Image (cartoon, rainbow, N blue to C red):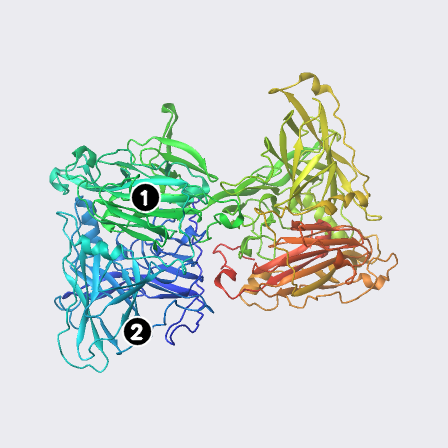
Amino acid sequence: MKMLLLGTKKMFLQILWCFSLISLSSQTRSHYNFVVREARYTRLCSTKSILTVNGKFPGPAIKVYKGDTIYVNVHNRGKNNITIHWHGVKQPRNPWTDGPEYITQCPIQPGRSFRQKIVFSTEEGTLWWHAHSDWSRATVHGPIYIYPKKNSSGYPFPKPQYEVPIILGEWWKSDLNKVFTQFIKSGGAPNNSDAVTINGQPGDLYNCSQSGTFKLNVEHGKTYHLRIINAAMNLILFFSVSKHNLTLFAHDAMYTKELTTSYICIAPGQTMDVLLHANQNPNNKYYMAARAYSTGVGVPFDNSTTTAIIQYNNNNENSTPSFPFLPSPNDTKSAFAFIRSIRGYPEENPFTCPLNIKTHIVTTISVNTFPCPRGRSPSSCQAPNSTIFAASMNNISFVTPRTDILEAYYYHINGVYRKGFPSFPPYVFNFTGDFLPLELNIPKRGTKVKVLKYGSTVEVVFQGTNLVAGIDHPMHIHGFSFHVIGYGFGNFNRSRDPKNYNLVDPPLQNTVIVPIKGWAAIRFRATNPGVWLMHCHLDRHLSWGMETVFIVKNGKASNETLPPPPPDMPPWSVKRKTGKERQNNTLEMKTIRGRTLICVSSIKHFVIIDKRFSMKILTSLGILLFLNVILVTCQAMRHHKFVVRDASFTKLCSTKNILTVNGEFPGPTLYVTKGESIIVDVYNRANYNITIHWHGVNQPRYPWSDGPEFITQCPIQPGGLFSQKVIFSEEEGTLWWHAHSDWSRATVHGAIVIKPKPGNTYPFPKPHKEVPIVLGEWWKEDIVQVFNNFETGGGDPVVSDAYTINGQPGDLYNCSNKETFKVNVEHGKTYLLRMVHAGMQDLLFFGIAKHQLTVVGSDGSYVKPFKVDYITISPGQTMDVLLEANQPLDRYYMAAKVYSSASNVAFDNTTTTAILQYKKGKHIIPSFSSRTPHMPSLPSSNDTNASINMISQMRSLADEAHPIDVPLNITTNLFYTVSVNTLPCSTCEGSHIPGNRLAASVNNISFQLPSGNNILNAYYNHLQGVYTQDFPDVPPELFDFTSSNLSTFLRTPSVDTEVKVLEYGSTVELVLQGTNLLAGTEHPMHLHGHSFYVVGWGFGNFDKDKDPLTYNLVDPPYQNTVAIPKNGWVTIRFKTQNPGVWFMHCHLERHLSWGMAMTFIVKNGKNPEEKMLPPPRDMPHC
């Protein structure tokens, strides 16, 4: 079994957009390149390599406007895994690129890349980005400037003249990986940093640091915007500027009421925007300085002071800067005097503080210990009493999984995490007492999460404890800003303390300092679906387990649900297990996300067997013992295996080989969730070329695996493999897949079932059972020979010998009684029939005797339910139909027969059947087997009025949960005729028109497939000679399209490979006009890559003045295939928001083969998310 790692496709597009901002030097970009690599830096008299972004320490600034969306291409050129987190950016509905390792993603492995989408919303001011893998954030971090929204009134105060980042950090002279490794290995506290830094520089109070000290030159009388970030690892810091007051106006990118102060207290993770007025004696110099605030008794910390220098312009004196006042390192009173003075600015902030709380959470936050692990000497465990340090929330020390929680939640993978993080402490004690029992020090280990309903109003009280070492804790929540409504010392009193909450102007923050032996209370609304980490931002505490995860469920509306992951999510990591690791593992077979996996119970990971390694199965013991396995710790997409091969099938009294997928006819049904992406590994083990198309799947920005031969790919040749990525987006309901090479789809096809997203339901009562009903055709002759004879003869093809339901003709045909498909139903139950018309040449009527059908969906989109006695369904179309088993216990035929209105065109006039039979309890009534089922009444084969019954009743559901967006302002009007034609052919003996062969056209152009290349490859790589861009917007010849007597010279089209190029974002109206040239008939037209609104239809010639007045622009059906009535017209509308090459053609296979097709090219848009993704590396070659 070949094992493919997902997410290897990279995008290397770099598009820079520059805008003027507050000052001429400021610019924003929509696209950034972050190259994570090592660089040499010298500090404190020694040089070492550190991990950086783009070689910079601190890293590059990101500059955006409020509400922008940007993309950052993160390329890992380092030696270790990496992730990047966008601290304080709420990322609405986009946890996929939030960044915490194994929480929302697997890490970016060395040599790999990840394109991260960063969605800014309500934030304004200063935030920051940093690594979120181990301790790499010590040097991998940088600022984010968020300017007021373009065309807004700007800042709520006079605009400062200049802006300056002030990034506070820590520096170790030792290699940070060694510091971290030793810290984890010892179980004790980490080594203290050797310096605190300002903008990467320790300052001139340290050895060898004077020349590098950061200096800020200011102009007297000007105002400076200091964007202050605490990027330190383990230190809350006091910061001050000598003789200058600071005016705080924003905290964590949310405005506050202006607060003038001589110092600030800022925790790791927090950001503050302050104004500095350069109003002191310009002849002097002034230090800005920072040093630790640390209250833990007996907890070591870096007690040095970092400095930078403020000097006024034209001051060249070599004087010693004056030093600012900074509180003592343990001055809790001063720290919280500042913190409690911060007030929110409700007039400028978008959120009101929740008052009616639905979800109350009280969580303890504690430093703990675990006993020294068995096998280690006590002296190697360096926490108190020969233990190892731990930390917890509500007595659970968080265990980071090795499959990320977000993907486990999204794809329903069991065993990665458990729900049930407690809402209150499991043990109630005097949390802040000075003398606590030692047994309270030991927490439980686990990966427990707290699930929140969408829209919940949440209050969290963080209760510090004095276990092991009471200390302040800066608690950070990803994905949210929250109101800090209260602080206090001692144990939280739920009767007394809420009376002192600030519910009038609480500050909005993303990181809050919980005081030593005290508590802090916050409130927020859970309106951001996804998986969000909550943790202490002292990195030693995070490493010890002081964290948990919120899962916010989807809401009901589409804008309240989690979208699918990006296609380049980092893949799983892979390692070979050692012999020692293989001992004492119990193994369990599982099928998860379409792959057969083995669960190794002792380590809770999955393994996949690779045939390159040996495997031994000890069946006598009932266990599996693997000598060599591959351990998979993070998987991004489900894989399906399609092996295209011949298989022998018997139908209609004869046996033949047919082309199949996995030996099945119809082929396997794919089950997916709305918005999911999957990989289908297509192996061609047949004797002919093959391609596979995912009919109705829009494949946003990814036409590469859409499938039509020589349109978007060259075929998969015999012996070849193509791993096709199938990206589901808005589709929900039933679609299908099929071959798109010659006529191989006659037997190579299957259904696709798209379930609602997790937490969502059908817009109708859940049915008791779902049943795929695939309608098809069967030829007793080899289909390849049928096609070859059709091609060389130049006439109509030989008609099929039978129609089929789920591959079976039914008992009205010879030799078919035994295999007739049967559906067993229980009285009173409702069944969802997932209908697929996989037939080749004709529309079909379908009905069930004495049962009405309720149509609820079509082409992967819901419709307003309507009841019918029968349906009319075109080749290519799918329908979701509810069947109520409400008739007397008996047997009933479901049947399908042709609808064909063309004069003098041969068709298969047989009827296929299946049997619906009622059960009594769990058993079929034995006497029923001899009864002849009731037969449904189906319209006559040429009953056009009956056929249009469906199209006239189709209406989109168009409710709040299933909104529609019908284009109203049309920018591109197109009018296309679809015709059956003739072309000269002196050797075509199968045609009924001497000297001619049958053809077909769109706008009088009979489409000719290119050879030796495909259109998509030619377009993407700017290759000439494959196609031309001259496809006409209107017919080149105007005539009475539906007249009964048309001149024969109109029958001859041109033959060419012409495409229509559409601008990205165009709103298109396309009128498809049937003609009566040669043989007027219905044409089911299918558009790849887009669904469209069917806004109108009619008979005769389209009248551009009269017919648009009848359009349904309120709730038109949303389809991908629409049948043009015989000698009539259909109008569709769609938006070109899917860049790429997209085929449009008639889904009657003879018409497609004759040339009734054309191709759209949708150009790239301006933004990165509007551009085509690059091709996969395994595209088939011609």
Q: Is residue 720 visible?
A: no
Q: Position of residue 144 (x, y in %)?
A: 35, 63
Task: Please identify the residue farthest to the right as the structure is shown.
Answer: 1045
Q: Position of residue 311 (x, y in %)?
A: 21, 76
Q: Under tag 1, what secondary structure?
A: helix
> Label 1 sits on what residue type?
Pro
**Label placed on residue 1131:** none
Q: Residue at x 27, y 44 (%)?
A: 546
Q: Under tag 2, what secondary structure?
A: strand
Q: Quadrant of residue 130?
A: bottom left
Indicate the quadrant containing the C terminus: top left, top right, bottom left or bottom right. Answer: bottom right
The label nearer to you, 1 versus 2, is: 1
With respect to residue 581, does 206 lie above or below?
below
In the picture of the structure, the residue carrying the numbered disc 2 is 223
**Label placed on residue 498:** 1
Q: Nearer the viewer, residue 342 or 429?
A: 342
Q: Nearer the viewer, residue 1129 or 959?
A: 959
> How many numbered discs sit on the rendered protein?
2
Q: Residue at x 32, y 48 (%)?
A: 501
Q: Say few, some or many: other residues with alpha carbon within 10 Å of mark 1 (under 14 / 14 to 19 / 20 or more).
A: some
> Label 2 sits on what residue type?
Thr
Q: Nearer the viewer, residue 488 or 1012?
A: 488
Q: Is residue 1078 visible?
A: yes
